[in-house]
Image (cartoon, rainbow, N blue to C red):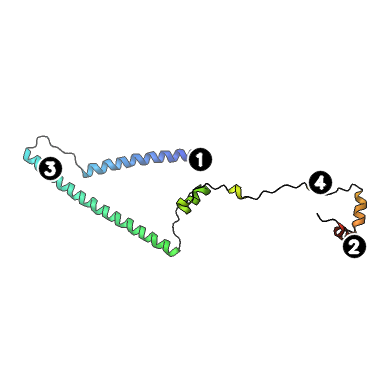
Amino acid sequence: MLKSLLLAKAKEELEQEIVDKEEEKERYLNERVPPLRTSGMSLRELQELCQELHAKIDVVDEERYDIEAKVIHNTREIQDLNMKVFDLRGKFKRPNLRRVRVSADAILRSLLGSKHKVSMDLRANLKSVKKEDTEKERPVEVGDWRKNVEAMSGMEGRKKMFDAAKTAPPQ
């Protein structure tokens, strides 16, 4: 509710500001440029009026040119000062980088040029691994697990495990 009221008030003020600018523009133009009354003037008077208007246009053009030159000079000075600030800070503007998706073939072509003619299959060089069935090789002892825990506890159990590993046939 408060937000909508603030937006409504801002909209009204913006509209009022636009109207005020238009009125100020009209007032300024009426003050600086009086309406021309050319009716009833002779040819000589019209020529003098045109010369006066031409002289005023020249003055306005000179002022406009001077202002444009000042603006360009100030813009360049601002850019130079910004560059000095960046130099003093040691920071420079970094360009925005974009991601480029390039295949392995394209990379090799760009590096090797015309030497690279064959497409490279990266999976061809991989080592093949056979999955061994480990469950079939190990004999599974079925028994009471409590007896196994009691037998293997303590130092004697560790010795039995060590001895069993020595006597086991190599695989």
Q: Quadrant of the C terminus?
A: bottom right
Q: Quadrant of residue 93?
A: bottom left
Structural distance between the alpha carbons of marks 2 and 4: 31 Å
Q: Is residue 96 visible?
A: no
Say whether disc 1 or disc 2 marks the residue closer to the N-terminus: 1
Q: Amino acid at mark 2?
A: Met
Residue matched to label 1? 3
Where disc 4 sits, the SS reads helix
Residue matched to label 2? 155
Residue matched to label 3? 50
Q: For this rendering, which residue is in front, 26 or 56?
A: 56
Residue matched to label 4? 136
Query: Residue 166: image x %, image y %?
Result: 86, 60
Q: Within 10 Å of the Cα at label 2, are there few (<14), some (14-19), or many (20+) other Cα atoms?
A: few
Where disc 3 sits, the SS reads helix
Q: How many marks?
A: 4
